[in-house]
Amino acid sequence: MSPWCRFGATLVPFSAPLSPPSPRGATLVPFLATPVPFLSLWCHSGAPFRPPVPPRCPWVSLGVPGCPWVPGDARWCHSGAIWCHLVPFLSLWCHSGAPFRPPVVSLGVPGCPWVSLGVPGCPWVPGGARWWRRDLRGNPLRCDCALRWLLAWLGTRPSPPEGRCREPLPHLGTALAQLSPRELQCHRDELRPFQSLPFQSLGAAPFALGGHPGVALAQPLAGACALLEWDQLGGRFRAQSVVNASSPVACHPIPLGDTLLLVVAQLGGGSWVWRRSGGPGSPFVRHQALGQGHLRRPHAVTSAHLGGHLYLAVADSSKGGTSTVFRWASRAFYPHQALRPWRRDTHLEFLELGGRAALVVCSAARRPQVYRWSGSAFAPHTDIPHAPDAYAAKHFRAGGGDGGGGVFLCVTRFLGDAKVMRWEGSMFREVQAVPARGSLVFQPLLLAGQRFVLLGNDFAPSRVFRPGAGGRLEPVQELPAPSPRAFVPLRAGQRHFLLATSFKGATQIYALVSEDVGT
């Protein structure tokens, strides 16, 4: 035998019978070698790691200290053998810095897959490495542009490819044999500055009435609520003040038939409900005073339809205040339920958990509280652990097999990391901690039919994420939005935009641009 073992040419002889699994579940299996002195593996930091080479026969470490992306169950390969524990895949890094998870190549040994090191497009992988036997079943394949090369290569094989796509959603469960490289999307979405509005704003809430979309903006320093609409002739957005208010913190629009209600929560002079009965350009008139004697310092407003009725919830952040749920009846909002007092609530979020309506309430210096709808009122159900001092919580739903879907909650804190939580049937459990620097908004939204999650930071650039497997967020872009307080998706014809309000600078609008990066 040559002084170098060979990968892919022949199986290294192993005359002794396979040892039975050890108490830790390890199995000794034959290993294929290649005539190279070493193989460079790349850590998350981008620094290469070159495992040592024993005399006469090189060996490759799959358990690299300091490289958390290498499965910890993989052990050293030595003397023509490797110890492993059901490693589903191994993440390798190309020179471009993009992660690649090669498919599992089975050696036919039960419970011990082997990972192919022959990766096209990664020049640092030895060219002598070859496939010995391919078995793609059970791999969490993401069928996007990065998988085009694999489909093209599998098309040259005599047998049809095995395996199915796990994501993205349009290809969920699709067999590789039914896909062609042209079906995989190869474009990159990016948010680019489009327009700067010369005013500061706090809250923002979208609405649509009579086919005309718009956004209601709260401008506490200007003392007004404004409606943001698209100017077809100018090809820009314009904001027109429609209601004067005393330090408004929320301007919440509610379409009712051909009428638009505007709930104005303000710090001085009491909160009011305004009404516009005509189309765009018609004036707003005062409709009713809201929560006289119930609201001291309103902080956030939200609404939802429950059981055929319209409900409005207002968070009260004063020390002796009480957040209140109002019900629309007889053309006015009436107090329906007072939540727990003395909580200093900062945010409310309606959502559905297990087929029942629920309400998440965030409070200063307390854990967020989850209320469940009983049919006539909200009853305390549980709190959310590991999220003290939560400022706000926003939810989104994600589909997916193998338990990857469900209801997720994005919880933000001004001091500390933001968190992604998942509903587990009776309570929320943490999925991921996202580093934040003075964050007051952690907003999931749909933009051009795609799910994005945006984290606004006061002391660092804001960040754009895409939900991945299991609801974990993957960063895709930084956004230079100054001290954002709300993110709202916008649409004008076939174009898509993102509005970012700012309390310390100009309100920014970004355009979603898609670029073809096909291979």
Image (tube, rainbow, N blue to C red):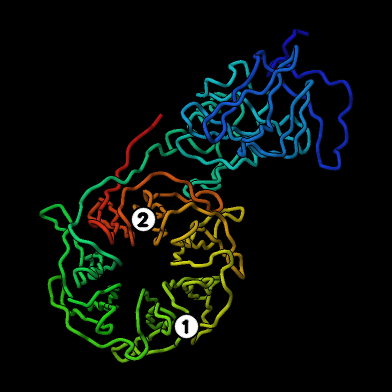
Residue plotted at (28% across, 68% down): 207
Q: Is residue 192 above or below residue 317?
A: above
Q: Is residue 249 above or below residue 492?
A: below
Comparing 67 with 321, the one in front is 321
Q: In this view, does 413 lie above or below 435?
A: below
Task: First in sequence, mark 1 or 2: give its number.
Answer: 1
Which quadrant of the rendered structure holds the C terminus? top left
Where residue 81 sits: x, y (%)?
78, 25
Query: What residue is shown with label 1?
Result: 342
Looking at the rendered structure, the kind of residue marked 1 is: Trp
Query: What residue is shown with label 2?
Result: 458
Between the residue at mark 1 and the residue at mark 2, the CA separation in whole angstroms equals: 28 Å
Q: In this view, does 359 lie above or below 290?
A: above
Where residue 271 sits: x, y (%)?
28, 82
Where residue 412 sits: x, y (%)?
46, 61
Within 10 Å of the Cα at label 2, are there few (<14), some (14-19), or many (20+) other Cα atoms? many
Comparing 110 with 44, the one in front is 44
Comparing 122 with 356, the one in front is 122
Q: What element carries label 2?
A: loop
Would residue 344 appear left or right of 259 to someone viewing this image? right
Which quadrant of the view contains residue 344? bottom left
Which quadrant of the view contains residue 202? bottom left
Where residue 389 sits: x, y (%)?
49, 67
Would residue 131 appear left or right of 357 to someone viewing this image? right
Residue plotted at (36% across, 48% down): 461
Looking at the rendered structure, the kind of residue marked 2 is: Asp
